[in-house]
Amino acid sequence: MRFVLGLLPAVLLMTAEPSLAQRKNEQALFDAPQETLIVKLPASAQTQNLPASVTCVYYPGFLVKQVDIGEKGAESLAIVPVAAQKPPCELSLPGEVHMQDWRGYFLGVKGSFVFFDADDGFNGGVPFAVFPAQGATGGNKLIEDSRKSFEAVELEGTDLVLRYDRVLSLDCSLQMEKTCWIKAQAVTGLPEDRKPDCGDAYAKNAPDSPDVPSVLSYPAELRLTASEWKISVRRGDVACYPAN
């Protein structure tokens, strides 16, 4: 079952790649791999004759494989089941399942959940996706959303629980349209008393364009069970700014 959280059309404009400090902090939230191997590949037609490498990150029961050819975003991302004997780190491995509708980079693993970052950010956030480590037929996503940074990535029994500052791109302007906040509340569950003031951000970044769609950033918790997901609002600041 797939749960995609981008419920309103996104405006893919502002770049927001995670910093080295953010990546380091987030890595501590994920499971430590058993082993990581990086193998340089010879130039070939398959690698478009560019400097290429394959990275294999091994976990109990599976590995995550990322092929890079020196361009933005990995050339391919795959999850490979591991039986009794650990497979070598090679360009092609038996049984590998490719992430068909995601382009980016491997981020980490929590239990039986595999996380990938997008190859770029937008509107102040970094998109991410979660795939199942086992039984990933066709590489189907479980979750897709956007965050400023993860605060917690945890397992509670078989449930996956994420806490992060969610970044949601709206299809309307909170500065211009009275009904836009109603739409945003329907998606986020934010109460009336947490409506942000967008005035300063629009005055600074879009002084002549109050109709530019708005972006919300707010603290969220997402819980994924075997059959459904639920996202709720946490305490903390809610920010609003124009898509850039």
Image (cartoon, grey):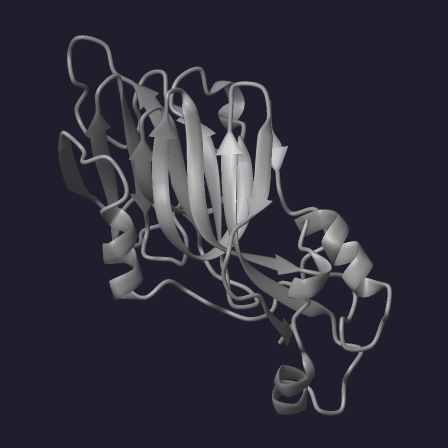
138 on left or right of 207: left
Residue at the (40%, 20%) spot, across then down: 158
14 on left or right of 107: right
Q: Position of residue 148 (x, y in %)?
A: 45, 60
122 on left or right of 90: right
- Is residue 239 visible in the rendered image? The answer is yes
Residue at the (23%, 35%) spot, across then down: 31
- For the image shown, how many numbered marks are present on the structure? 0
Residue at the (73%, 54%) spot, across then down: 185
Q: Is residue 17 above or below residue 201?
A: above
The one of 48 and 93 positioned closer to us in this rendering? 93
Q: Is residue 176 above or below residue 28?
A: below
Q: Residue furthest top?
A: 84
Q: Position of residue 230 (x, y in %)?
A: 59, 34
Q: Position of residue 175 (x, y in %)?
A: 77, 77
Residue at the (57%, 67%) spot, across then down: 123
Examine the image and state in which quarter residue 3 appears.
top right
Examine the image and state in which quarter residue 112 appears.
top left
Q: Is residue 59 above or below residue 150?
A: above
Q: Position of residue 45 (x, y in %)?
A: 36, 43
The one of 169 and 134 positioned closer to us in this rendering? 169
The one of 109 and 36 positioned closer to us in this rendering? 109
Q: Residue furthest front?
A: 193
- Is residue 45 visible in the rendered image? The answer is no
25 on left or right of 239: left
Image quadrant holding the C terminus, namely bottom right
Q: Is residue 228 above or below residue 13?
A: above
Image quadrant holding the N terminus, namely top right
The one of 91 and 220 positioned closer to us in this rendering? 220
